[in-house]
C-alpha cells in the first residue's frame, strides 16, 4: 500500500543487499533433468568466489558426457576444435560453457535492490475471498499499542473493472482473410487502448475485520490518524470468481470443463530475460525446486528472434510475427495500430476444448500486447488481471534504483502481486475442478540486470511450493521458461554472453502418473532435452496436452523435419538444423565460429556493410521533413568470428558466415549482426536482424517502430 500523505515511516532496504545463495552441490544430467542439491548460506550476501566454485563444479558434472576435450578458457578466444559440447547431434553442435567462466566473471556481482517494498508492510491483505486490515502491521504505522485500532485506521473498498464490449471478433486466417488495406477501418483499427480503460464504483464499503468480497478487483483506500499526523493509503486487490469457459452456454453440459485424466491443465510460468546459464548463477533455489518436481531441462532450447514479443507470439499462436501480420494483425500503413482480437491464439483452442484460460504479466506498461501496441478490444482470456497490475503500477509503482523497472506496487513487489493472483487462480480452479490454461509471466525483477534474478529466486521457489501445495500439479503440465537471455549490458560484449543469450531457460514438469502411463511420450520428452527445440515445438505440444487419448501412438512416430514445430512428445530428429526449426542464422546457437582479427580487411568490409544496412533501414522511416535519425558511421569493430559454409569433402568453400559486434557513432551503439559473405561475388547478405546489445535510453524516441528505435540516434537526441 502506497503512502499518499505524511508518514513517519520510510522505505528501507529490501532485506538489504540480496544475492548469491551458496551453491554447494548441483548435479546436472544431460538430456534428462536437472538434479540440484542446495544449502543456504547463513548470510543473504554470498561472495562471488564461493558462487564460482559451486558453478564450476556444476558445469564440470554437466560436461562429463561431452565428447570433445576441454581446454582452459582463460587464455582468450577458443577455436571450435577445442570446445566441449552441450549438444552434439548431426544437425546442431552447441558449445558447453562454464556458467562462471573467467570471461563473464567480471559481470557477475552481488545485487543490491536499493530498498525494500515492504517497509512499512502492507496494511491491508486479502485471502482467496476476503479483505482485512493486518493487525500485525499497525505498529509500523504508529498506531499506539493498547489503543482501539478502529479509532486510528479507517479503510474502505470500491469495485474496479474493465468495461466489456458486447462484440464478437471472428478469427482471420486462410479461410477468412483480413479486409484489404483500404477497408481497414473501425473498431479493430481505432487506436483505443481498451485494456487500459479501468472504471471504479461510486460506493466505498467500510471494513476492518475480514469481509467477503464479491468483486473481481477492488481499490482500497485507508486513512491512518495518529495524533496530528494523517496518512492516506491506497492499494489494489484481486479475487477469482467462478466463470465458465467462453463459448460454453450457461445450460451446457459442465462435464467437458472438468479436469480428468483425459487431458492436462497447462501452466506456463515465465521469468523474463534469463538464460539457462544465468539461472545456474542466480536462481539455484528455483532450480532445486524444479528438480525435486522431476522437471526435464531443455538444454537445446533456442530463441527464435530478438526480444519478448517475437519469441512469445510463436508460443501463443504458432506463427512468426511476419506471419501474424499477414494473417490477422496489420493496419493500413505497416504499423502497430491494429488490435490482436482476430488472431487464433492458443487460448481460444483451449476454450473450445472446455478449458478456462488466464494470461497475467507484471510490468504492465510494457506488456506483451501493449508496448507500442494497442492490445485487445475485448478482454482476451477468461481471467485477465491487467486492471490490477496496470492500475497498480500506474498509481503505486516505484523504483528502488535510479534505473530499471518499478519493482514495487505500493508495499509489495510487482512479482509478489502477480504470484498472489496466480496462486489464487490455481486454487480456485482446483476447488471448481476446472481444466485451465494459464500464463504467469514475471518481468520486473529479471529484465533489467544480469544479477537481479537472484532477488526473485526466493519468490519463484515459494510460488512453486504454493502451487505444489494446492495438489493441482498432479493434473498439470508445468512449463517453467524464459524468452531469451539478457539482451543488453556488459556481458553481451563477450562471446559467451552473446551465445547464452540465445539459450534461455526451459524446464517441463509432468505428473508422475502420466510418465508411467505414457512411457514413450515421457522418454521422448527426456530425449528431446538434448535436442534443438523452440517455442514452435512447445506450441505443438499444447495440442497433445489437450487430448491425451492418442499421445502414446503419436509418440511412437518420428517428428518430421518438414515441420517447423514438432511436439516435445515426439522424437525430434538429431539431424534437425536451425533453419528447419525456424531459427534465423543470427540467433542460432548451433554455430562453432573461430575468432578473426578485428582489423582483417574482410571483417571491416562486412562491418561497413552492416552500417549501410542500418542506415538504409533508418532512411525508410523518413517523412516529409526527412529522416529523424542521424546517419550512423562505423566507430570500431569490437569482435569478429566466422565459419565456413559448405565445403564438404572435396567441394570448395563458397560462403563464409561472419558474426560481428561493432560500435557506431553518434550514440555509441553496440550492434551485433550475422552476415553471409559469398566468396565468388564478394556480395553479402544479412542473416536475421541486427541487434543492439547496450542500453539505448531515449536515443531513438523520435520513431515508434521498435526494431528501428533501438538503432536510431535521433537528430535532436540529448542522450
Image (cartoon, grey):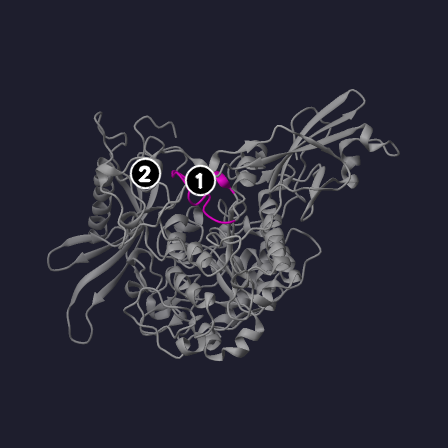
Boundaries of the magenta span: 363-382
User: How far is disc 2 from disc 1 in space, using C-alphas?
Assistant: 32 Å
Residue 110 location, x and y as percent? 58, 49
In front: mark 2 or mark 1? Answer: 1
| Above-or-below relation of 9 to 579 | above
Quarter of the picture holding the C terminus: top left
Residue 37 location, x and y as percent? 62, 67
Q: Report the front residue among 508 and 198.
A: 198
For mark 2, what is the residue?
Answer: 705
Q: Is residue 20 visible?
A: no
Disc nearer the start of the sequence (2/1): 1
Q: Is residue 674 magenta?
A: no
Residue 615 location, x and y as percent? 23, 39
Q: Report the front residue among 186 and 316.
A: 186
Left or right of 170? Residue 28 is right
For mark 1, what is the residue?
Answer: 166
Label 2: element kind? loop
Label 1: element kind? loop
| Above-or-below relation of 348 to 225 | below
The image quarter in which residue 36 lies: bottom right
Secondary structure predominantly adopted by residues drawn in magenta: loop
Amino acid at each position: 500500500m502506497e503512502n499518499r500523505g505524511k508518514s513517519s515511516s520510510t522505505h528501507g532496504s529490501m532485506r538489504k543487499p540480496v544475492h548469491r545463495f551458496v551453491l554447494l552441490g548441483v548435479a546436472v544430467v544431460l538430456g534428462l533433468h536437472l538434479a540440484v542439491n542446495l544449502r543456504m548460506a547463513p548470510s543473504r550476501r554470498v561472495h562471488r568466489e564461493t558462487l564460482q566454485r559451486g558453478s564450476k563444479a556444476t558445469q564440470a558434472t554437466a560436461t562429463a558426457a561431452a565428447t570433445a576435450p576441454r581446454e582452459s578458457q582463460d587464455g582468450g578466444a577458443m577455436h571450435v576444435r577445442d570446445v566441449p559440447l552441450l549438444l552434439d547431434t548431426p544437425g546442431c553442435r552447441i558449445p558447453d560453457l562454464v556458467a562462471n567462466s573467467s570471461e563473464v566473471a567480471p559481470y557477475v556481482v552481488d545485487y543490491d535492490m536499493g530498498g525494500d517494498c515492504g517497509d512499512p508492510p502492507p496494511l491491508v491483505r486479502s485471502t482467496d475471498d476476503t479483505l482485512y486490515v493486518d493487525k500485525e502491521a499497525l505498529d509500523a504505522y504508529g498506531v499506539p499499542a493498547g489503543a482501539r485500532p478502529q479509532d486510528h485506521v479507517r479503510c474502505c473498498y470500491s469495485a474496479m473493472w474493465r468495461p466489456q464490449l458486447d462484440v464478437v471478433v471472428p478469427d482471420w486466417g486462410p479461410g477468412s482473410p483480413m479486409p484489404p488495406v483500404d477497408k481497414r477501418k473501425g473498431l479493430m483499427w481505432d487506436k483505443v487502448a481498451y485494456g487500459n480503460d479501468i472504471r471504479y464504483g461510486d460506493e466505498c464499503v467500510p471494513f476492518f475485520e475480514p469481509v467477503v468480497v464479491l468483486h473481481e478487483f477492488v481499490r482500497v483506500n485507508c486513512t491512518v490518524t495518529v495524533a496530528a499526523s494523517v496518512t492516506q493509503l491506497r492499494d489494489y486487490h484481486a479475487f477469482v470468481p467462478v466463470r465458465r469457459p467462453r463459448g460454453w452456454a450457461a445450460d451446457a453440459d459442465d462435464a467437458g470443463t472438468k479436469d480428468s485424466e483425459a487431458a492436462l491443465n497447462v501452466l506456463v510460468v515465465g521469468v523474463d530475460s534469463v538464460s539457462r546459464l544465468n539461472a545456474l548463477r542466480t536462481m539455484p533455489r528455483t532450480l532445486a525446486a524444479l528438480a525435486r518436481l522431476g522437471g526435464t531441462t531443455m538444454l537445446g532450447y533456442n530463441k527464435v528472434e530478438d526480444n519478448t514479443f517475437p519469441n512469445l507470439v510463436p508460443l501463443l499462436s504458432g506463427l512468426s510475427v511476419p506471419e501474424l501480420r499477414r494473417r490477422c494483425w496489420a493496419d493500413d500503413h505497416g504499423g502497430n495500430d491494429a488490435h490482436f482480437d482476430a488472431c487464433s491464439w492458443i487460448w481460444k483452442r483451449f476454450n473450445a476444448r472446455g478449458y478456462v484460460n488466464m494470461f497475467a504479466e507484471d510490468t504492465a506498461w510494457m506488456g506483451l500486447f501493449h508496448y507500442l501496441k494497442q492490445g485487445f478490444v475485448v478482454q482476451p482470456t477468461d481471467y485477465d488481471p491487467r486492471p490490477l497490475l496496470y492500475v497498480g503500477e500506474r498509481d503505486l509503482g516505484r523504483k528502488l534504483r535510479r534505473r530499471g523497472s518499478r519493482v514495487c506496487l505500493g508495499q509489495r513487489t510487482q512479482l509478489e502481486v502477480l504470484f498472489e493472483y496466480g496462486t489464487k487462480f490455481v486454487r480456485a480452479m482446483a476447488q471448481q475442478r476446472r481444466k485451465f490454461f494459464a500464463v504467469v509471466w514475471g518481468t520486473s525483477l529479471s529484465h533489467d540486470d544480469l544479477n537481479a534474478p537472484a532477488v526473485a529466486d526466493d519468490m519463484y521457489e515459494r510460488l512453486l511450493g504454493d502451487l505444489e501445495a494446492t495438489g493441482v500439479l498432479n493434473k498439470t503440465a508445468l512449463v517453467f521458461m524464459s524468452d531469451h537471455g539478457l539482451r543488453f549490458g556488459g556481458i553481451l560484449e563477450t562471446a559467451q554472453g552473446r551465445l547464452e543469450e540465445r539459450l534461455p531457460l526451459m524446464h517441463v514438469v509432468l505428473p508422475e502418473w502420466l510418465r508411467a502411463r505414457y512411457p514413450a511420450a515421457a522418454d521422448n520428452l527426456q530425449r528431446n532435452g538434448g535436442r534443438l527445440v523452440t517455442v514452435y515445438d512447445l506450441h505443438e505440444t499444447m495440442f497433445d496436452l489437450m487430448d491425451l487419448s492418442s499421445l502414446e501412438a503419436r509418440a511412437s512416430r518420428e517428428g518430421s523435419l518438414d515441420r517447423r514445430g514438432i511436439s516435445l512428445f515426439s522424437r525430434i530428429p538429431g539431424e534437425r538444423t536451425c533453419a528447419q526449426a525456424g531459427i534465423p542464422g543470427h540467433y542460432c546457437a548451433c554455430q562453432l565460429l573461430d575468432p578473426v582479427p578485428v582489423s582483417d580487411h574482410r571483417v571491416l568490409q562486412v562491418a561497413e556493410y552492416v552500417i549501410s544496412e542500418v542506415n538504409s533501414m533508418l532512411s525508410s522511416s523518413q517523412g516529409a521533413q526527412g529522416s529523424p535519425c542521424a546517419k550512423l558511421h562505423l566507430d570500431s569493430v569490437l569482435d569478429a568470428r566466422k565459419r565456413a559454409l559448405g565445403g564438404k569433402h572435396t567441394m570448395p568453400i563458397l560462403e563464409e558466415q561472419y558474426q560481428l559486434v561493432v560500435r557506431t557513432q553518434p550514440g555509441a551503439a553496440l550492434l551485433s549482426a550475422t552476415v553471409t559473405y559469398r566468396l565468388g561475388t564478394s556480395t553479402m547478405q544479412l542473416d536475421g536482424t541486427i541487434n543492439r546489445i547496450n542500453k539505448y535510453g531515449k536515443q531513438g524516441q523520435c520513431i515508434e517502430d521498435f526494431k528501428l528505435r533501438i538503432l536510431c540516434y535521433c537528430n535532436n537526441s540529448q542522450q
